[in-house]
Amino acid sequence: MAFVDFILQGKGGVGKSFIAVLLIQYYKLKGYDVRALDTDPVNNTLAGYTEFDVDVHDLEDPIYRSI
């Protein structure tokens, strides 16, 4: 079974990365295989947590426009 959690908000400083880190830690402790993506085009805060091996994706990249 797959779980997908989205943490969304346009404004900065509201705790998106903090909540994402809590979810990553929780799922990893439960034994799930976790894949974290940071799509913030301005401030890739989540990607700064190197122990979580976060993938950075630029949603402005033309590859995503066909999705």
Image: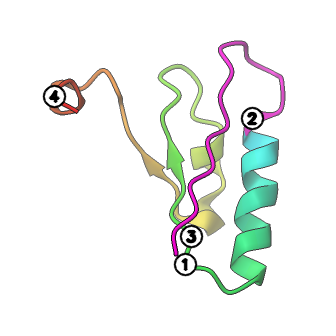
The residue at which mark 4 appears reads as 66
Q: Residue furthest front?
A: 1
Classify residue 37 as left or right of residue 19: left
Query: Which label sits in the foreground, 4 or 2?
Result: 4
The residue type indicated by label 4 comes to Ser
User: Dominant secondary structure of the magenta stretch?
Assistant: loop
**Residue 26 placed where, x, y %?**
79, 70
* Spatial CA span between label 4 and label 1: 27 Å
The residue at which mark 1 appears reads as 33
The residue at which mark 3 appears reads as 34
**Residue 60 placed where, x, y %?**
30, 20
In this rendered view, identify the residue nearer to me: 2 or 50. 2
Labels 3 and 4: the sequence-earlier one: 3
Numbered label attached to residue 16: 2
* Spatial CA span between label 1 and label 3: 4 Å
The residue type indicated by label 1 comes to Asp
The residue type indicated by label 3 comes to Val
